[in-house]
Amino acid sequence: MDGPKSDECSGKELWMPKTNALTLILSRCGLPTKQTEWDTWYDDVHLPDLVNSGAFWTASRWTVTNSNQLIYPRLGFTHLTLGEIDAEDLEASEETLAALEPEWRISGRLHPNHFVDDMVTLKPFGRWSDKGEPSPDTRGLWVIFNRCNDPAKVDEWHEWLDDVHLPECLELSGFHGVSRWIRVRPEPHLPSYCVIYDVRDASMDEGIQRIVDLNRSWEAEGKIPDYHAGSLGFVIEPTDRWGAAGYSRP
C-alpha cells in the first residue's frame, strides 16, 4: 500500500507506490549452455528495461526450486519475474510491454535464447489483498493457482478460504504473509484465482514441509471441502542480483 518508508542512508521518508496488480512472467533460457549469459543479460539489461518502460514500478526475479514435493512434473519455465503495477489502467501497462517487445528485438536488447512461456496479470482479491512491499528478507514464495469445483458453492468457497483456511495456514505454518489474487482476464477451463505465501524461514524447505503436513492432516480430518482444488503450484526462490528486493523505478 502507499505509505512512507525511511531511507536508511538519508533518514528521509520515501513514498512507496501501491501495487494494484501483479504480472507473472514465466520464462526460461532456450539453451542450457547459454544460461549464465542469459542470467547476466536479464540482470543487466532486461529487468531494468521492464521497469524503466513504465509498465512496473518494481520487478523481482525468481527461480523455480525442485527441492521439495510440491513441484509437479516439469513445468517448462525455470524462472519467474514478478512485476508490480501501480497504474490504475492495467491494459495500458500490458500494451506498453507489447509495443516495446518488437523494438527491443530490433535493437538487439532481447537475448536470442530468451523464451516466455506465459504472462499472467493478477489483481488483488478478497480479504487478503495486501501483498506488502518487496523485501530482501523473503526467502521464497509459494504460488498456488486454485479454484472451486462447484459453481453453486463459489461464495462458500471464498468464505472458507478467507475466514478459515488462510488464517489457519498463517497461524500454524509460520509463513510471514499471504495474499489472494484473481486473473484480470479469466480463461475458460483455467483456474482464475491465485494464492501467494511469503516464506521467511531460515530453511524454506522446512517451512513448506509444515504446510504439506498440515494439509494432509486437514484432509484426513475432513477439513478440506470437496469443492476445493489446487491447480498449478510451484515454489520460487530469489535469484541473481535483484532477487526478492527487486529493481525499482529510479
Image (cartoon, rainbow, N blue to C red):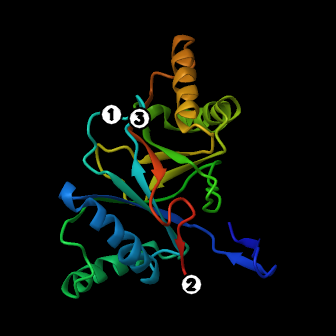
Contact (Cβ within 8 Å) of mark 3 with mark 1: no
**In the figure, 59 relative to 231: above or below?**
below
- Left or right, residue 103 beside residue 20: left
The amino acid at mark 1 is Tyr
Q: Give the SS element for disc 3.
A: loop
Using the rendered image of the protein, determine whether residue 116 is visible from the camera's viewpoint.
no
Label 2 vs label 3, nearer the camera = 3
Contact (Cβ within 8 Å) of mark 2 with mark 1: no
Label 2, on which residue?
250
- Label 2 to label 1, Cα distance in Å? 38 Å
Disc 2 or 3, which lies upstream in sequence? Answer: 3
Image spot of residue 230 (x, y percent) = 42, 34
Q: Give the SS element for disc 1.
A: loop
The amino acid at mark 2 is Pro
Disc 2 or 1, which lies upstream in sequence? Answer: 1
Q: Residue at x 45, y 83 (%)?
A: 52
Q: Residue at x 42, y 83 (%)?
A: 53
Crowding at mark 3 (Cα within 10 Å: few <14, some 14-19, many 20+) = few
Disc 3 or 1, which lies upstream in sequence? Answer: 3
Image spot of residue 158 (x, y percent) = 56, 39
Image spot of residue 182 (x, y percent) = 47, 52
**In the figure, 63 relative to 68: above or below?**
below
Label 3, on which residue?
67
Label 1, on which residue?
72
Q: Residue at x 63, y 74 (%)?
A: 17
Q: Give the SS element for disc 2.
A: loop
The amino acid at mark 3 is Ser
Crowding at mark 2 (Cα within 10 Å: few <14, some 14-19, many 20+) = few
